[in-house]
Image (cartoon, helix red, strand yellow):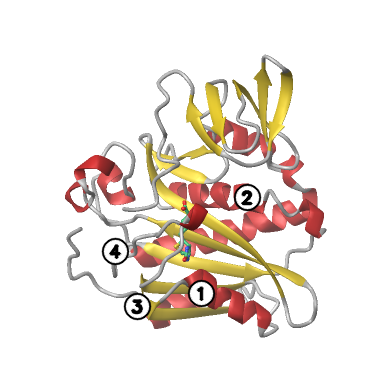
Amino acid sequence: MTVKDDLPLDIGPLRERLVRDGRLVDWEHHETIDSTNRRAAVVGREGLAGPVLVTAEHQSAGRGRQGRVWESPAHRNFYGSFVLCPKVAQAELAPITLVAALAVSDAIAGIGLADAAIKWPNDVLLGGRKVAGILTELDSAANGEFCVVVGIGVNLNLQEEDFPPELRSKAGSLAWHGGRSVDRSDFVESLTQAFLDRVHAFEQRGFAGLRADYEQRHVLQGEVVRVDGGAGYTGRVLGVDDAGALLLATAQGQQAVHAGEVTLAGSYETLGGAVSKN
Ligand code: BTN
């Protein structure tokens, strides 16, 4: 991957923008770190109930789902983790990762790019290519409360030639899709506001209040898919339920799928869900 010499974030003015309405308790930014998820968990354990945002220009050990590596070249993308102790019962927390996907698609719209789609549970796509991934990890705070780390990686200013040829049909970036570079400070602000808004709505109304928005952006809605892992169902996607599970109409009746890798059954083509390397 070629890495151009792009500029780091302008910290001072961005801090003002992020904390001015008082909803974000703190923002911690690193030039380089192993993983913002690991650091955010430490912040949570130290007792800051959050929400706190930890971001980095570069990660040396970025974590993807299922133990994959999240490639994290410097100064081009967004790597950030929110740590928070949400006001919902722990048993009702599972859809937070879908809530985060909604927030990422809002943030993309917020900087002027329409049509971001979501692939269950939490991949965000532009033009059918994965541009963002989310890794959610549960932790407990010093005061005994549970808190959650929601780690988000978004490909912002990578260009087509930055992706290895074998990934170019599956992975993309906002700049490549939109034909213009993205102001990373604008994106961090847009994402932070969208995330805090969506989490607030989730705390107030549960995922039931966000389902319609999610399904409207869900790229698999109505498609016949196969789920690898778990019970391994094939069926038509009906939507998602209030717990964030994928609802399928299968030959065995309606099934709620809580985990697994989903692919279109017809072509058996992944929609970028297996992609965690840029
Ligand atoms: C996926 O595999 O789709 C999830 C990728 C999540 C990557 C982000 S980048 C910021 C945060 N820190 C990490 O180590 N991982 C997440």
10 Å crowding of disc 4: few (<14), some (14-19), many (20+): many
Where residue 127 sits in the image (x, y, percent)?
35, 35
10 Å crowding of disc 1: few (<14), some (14-19), many (20+): many
In the image: residue 9, left or right of residue 199: left
* Kind of residue at badge 2: Val
Query: Could you tell which of marks 4 and 3 lies nearer the N-terminus?
Result: 3
Q: Which residue is mark 1?
A: 54
* Kind of residue at badge 4: Arg
**Badge 2 element:** helix
**Badge 3 element:** loop
* Numbered disc in front, either 3 or 2: 2
Is there CB contact under 8 Å for labels 3 and 2?
A: no
Residue at the extreme bottom of the image, as rendered: 46
Q: Which residue is mark 2?
A: 99
10 Å crowding of disc 2: few (<14), some (14-19), many (20+): many
**Distance between mark 3 and mark 2 Cα atoms:** 28 Å
